[in-house]
Image: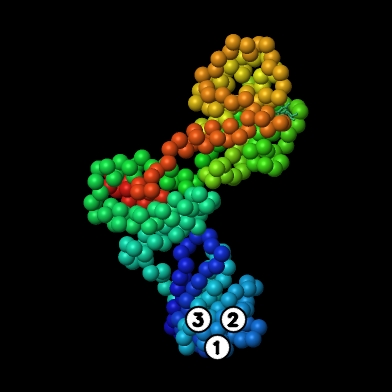
Amino acid sequence: MTGTIQELTPPGRGAVAALRLNANLQAVTEAGRQADRSLFSGNRYPTLADLPLNRLCYGNWNTEGLVVCRIAEDVVEIYPHGGLATVQQIVQDLAACGVQNRPRESSDFHSIYEQDVLKVLTECLTTRTASYVLQQRNLARSFWQRCQNGDLSASELETANKWKEFGRHLIEPWNLVLTGLPNVGKSSMMNRILGYERSIVYDQPGTTRDLLETETALDGWPIRLCDTAGQRDQSSGVEAAGIDLARQKLQEADLIVLLVDRSIPLDEATIKLMETYPSAILVYHKSDLPVDHSWSGFVPKQECCAVSSKTQAGMNDLMSEIVARLIPDLPTAEMVYPISPLQREWLRMRQ
Ligand SMILES: Nc1nc2c(ncn2[C@@H]2O[C@H](COP(=O)(O)OP(=O)(O)OP(=O)(O)O)[C@@H](O)[C@H]2O)c(=O)[nH]1
Ligand SMILES: [Mg+2]
């Protein structure tokens, strides 16, 4: 039995996938019966061999609903939903019938480039980041071709390197980690930023034990927000393990938000935290409560925002500050920079 099956859509997430089967459909159907594989079965047209020409036909492949269209005597296009498992199942079932998997057309630079960018596009989490990927798709093709040939100027290389991290974050969220002593309101702030109750809030210290990560978007930028166990030295068991995890997470953070509660006396543990994270955004939390007198005259090193998760006062300013710190600058419309691991590798080879 000869014949080929080819994936037409690039790998990655998508609503619909497309595959093209090129084979004698009668022979494939017969081979399917012998191999005990349930290939296509339609409501009106029971097997692939029964399909009429140029008509979209609904049916099932195993248990998955899909659409097929016979576009020539020996050619059927198959449109399952875009999950990887279904596509693999179709390819495997046909392989069991002797149909070969033909690689995607990817031999020339343009199709490699196009597939790579389309994969990035399917991984974008927001329309804002997708608009940057689309801009690069049209702008950067000749740039990357010249990069292959070693024809980039020093200033082009410099620009590409400068915006490399920005390009990476178009599909990888920035890591934002909340920290502070127990009970300062980290979980309350997490819920306020997200707009729903993700994290347990309770009036006793030591409530959050594990890391709680959730993806969200601020101003159209993808952010992985992490709530952590409150840091205190006299802890043991599960709580101490949670604090260890929190400290590791803080090392990987792109930005730390350090919360302090000025309604209670300023103590050594709070001062130590402020010294440990000098580049954090410092949040004077629970700003709806009166400030304890021990804070008078205290001037921290960090930028600070007064915020109340209870009344939401200061919340918008804090969100703007987070975005300004993570993305202080934007590339202009004519700048080219890498947006995928493959493009970063192309750039690395030219350094
Ligand atoms: N007045 C006031 N109370 C708040 C505010 N934010 C949180 N709280 C209260 O502070 C207490 C602790 O809040 P959490 O959000 O659980 O604090 P946490 O920092 O996550 O605590 P741990 O997980 O134990 O480290 C709760 O009783 C909250 O209702 C605020 O802005 N103003
Ligand atoms: Mg908590």
**Which residue is depicted at the point 30% across and 41% down?**
158
Q: Are marks 1 and 2 in contact (CB under 8 Å)?
A: yes
Mark 1–mark 2 Cα distance, whole angstroms, equals 9 Å
> Tag 1's secondary structure?
loop
The image shows residue 200 at horizontal and vertical percentages of 72, 37
Which is more toward the observer, 239 or 13?
13
**Which residue is depicted at the point 57% across and 44% down?**
217
Q: Which residue is mark 2?
A: 57
The image shows residue 193 at horizontal and vertical percentages of 63, 38
> Tag 3's secondary structure?
strand
Q: Which residue is mark 1?
A: 52
Q: Residues within 10 Å of mark 1 (few under 14, many from 20)?
A: some
Q: Which of labels 2 and 3 is toward the front?
A: 2
Three-letter amino acid code of the residue under disc 2: Cys
Three-letter amino acid code of the residue under disc 3: Val
Q: Which mark is residue 107?
A: none
Up/down of 80 relative to 145, above or below: below
Q: Residues within 10 Å of mark 2 (few under 14, many from 20)?
A: some
- Position of the C terminus, as image quadrant, is top left
The image shows residue 111 at horizontal and vertical percentages of 36, 64
